[in-house]
Image: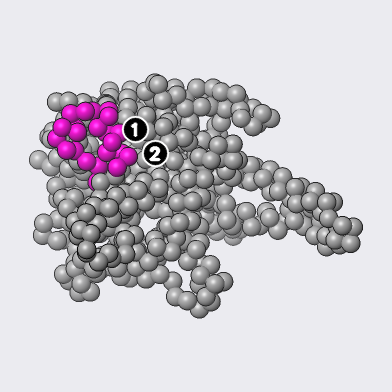
Amino acid sequence: MPRIKYVCLSDLHLGEETSLLTAAEPAASPRGASGPRLKPNPEKASPVMERLVDCLTELVAATGGGQPTLILAGDILELALASDEIGARVFQTFIQMTMAPGSELFDRIVYVPGNHDHHLWETARETQYVDYMDRIGPTGTLRPPTHVTMMFDDYGLHAPRQPLLTALAHRAAPHLADRDFVIDTVYPNFGLVRDDLSRCIVFNHGHFIEALYSAMSWLRQNIFAPGTEAPKQAKDLEEENFAWIDFFWSTMGRQGGVGQDIEFIHEAGEDPRKRALLVDNVSRGLTNLYDRAPWWVSIPLHVWLPRWWLRFILGKGSDYFLGFEKAKVSWARAADGTIQAREAPLSDEALEGLRVYLGRYVRSQLVDAYGKDQEAAPRDIAFVFGHTHKPLEDCAGCEQYPLPVRRYNTGGWLSEHADPRPIIGGSMLLADEDLETVTLRMWRQQKDQSDCVRLMTASRESEAEGRFHRHVAEALAARKSAFEAFSQAVAAEMATRAPYL
């Protein structure tokens, strides 16, 4: 009987007030005119988190028991838009619920950092470097620090511990410290491979599928050193862009009052109305500066660069640089021949970014592990990522791989809009000992949650339903009441929060 060996969750955004896994309550807006807003309350446990843990506990028990490994695929703590201690305290609550003495739900936790908690990768790799210096001693020759870890490190032999998350786990459950329990960090790709090397799962947060997160590489290729080739390996991609990701996407939002304004810029990336307001404010501020210049500078600027022209230029620029994947749409030809926007799990740009990331950066790490001979490497590849908050299960061909790649997106847990957007939602990936994979969609951005819990899989053409899929479906039916209670908790939370979004 196949049992659940691995569970993957992503984009919990613990500490962010719009995360369903963070308890929140109304608060006066720090920006006055924008009206009342939500604020996180780390003193309480989110009802959705409580019910989610119940569902996991019931599902593991109904599929044979044991303790699966939990893989956290990025954006677990909200470091970009929330104070450190808020996300930390919510994470402690999660550990208390899942790792209580004598009833620990997981045997191991592996953490794959994302963009909103990228700084935790920086602290992990610096901790790893300090440990390395201790090993070689004061006379050893220092090598450069690494920007990535090995992809395949199932036993944690080379994965650095995450200092903050490990310390929080020990605070929340002191018995974990007694047994030297650590939370391992693997970045940017964490791979699992079956014993016979026929099947492989690669976990990644997914931010590099958006061109925005490799902006420094683009600048190098097009501005600083035109003609320079794009990075060929994951370590090169990260080395060129880590400071940019860490600066804007993982630390800027915590800078006091300025951080609140940075949060508005983040929100503008997901809401065209806020983006238009931001553009209008910036263009007004720039034209107001004209009047402070001498008349021979001020008049030409008003004539040749008026506010309406600035607004147009900044608007186009903001659509490109602040149009986050979560808010993008794809374009398709309708029956009448017109080209219309439609919501899809991945925009056309993200599909291309995913193709490049799989074909270049995941492939390079597979070559490092198995050599260039494809026959020696796993043929059945599943790629699991989050970041977009839009769940996905499909298969797609990639010329660097012998079989179509199974692609899963685990969605996210932010409920940021009062309006329905059913394409936004959260799911969890489950895998058994043979690395057969399914996802369990848990919620969607809509009022009615009664039909949201669904078992899905990424199957190739003519592929029969797997044994693990059937086993999880039976367990889901047997523990239906736990999942109904979860859906009711989500619906209640969304209704409570809607007036403040």
Secondary structure character of the magenta stretch overall: helix
Q: Which residue is mark 2?
A: 77
Q: Amino acid at mark 1?
A: Phe
Q: Number of labelled discs?
A: 2
Say whether residue 197 is magenta.
no
Q: Amino acid at mark 2?
A: Leu
- In the picture, measured across the screen, residue 286 lies left or right of residue 338, that is right
Query: In the rendered view, would you say 488 is above or below 212?
Result: above
Q: Which residues are magenta?
A: 163-184
Residue at image x 19%, y 33%? 177
**Badge 2 local density, few (<14 within 10 Å), some, or many (20+)?**
many
Nearer the observer, 12 or 400: 12
How is the structure coloured here?
one colour
Q: Which quarter of the picture shows residue 484? A: top left
- Dot 2: what SS? loop
Residue found 76% across the figure and 47% down from its top: 284
Per the image, the residue denoted by label 1 is 91
Q: Position of residue 388 (x, y in %)?
A: 44, 48
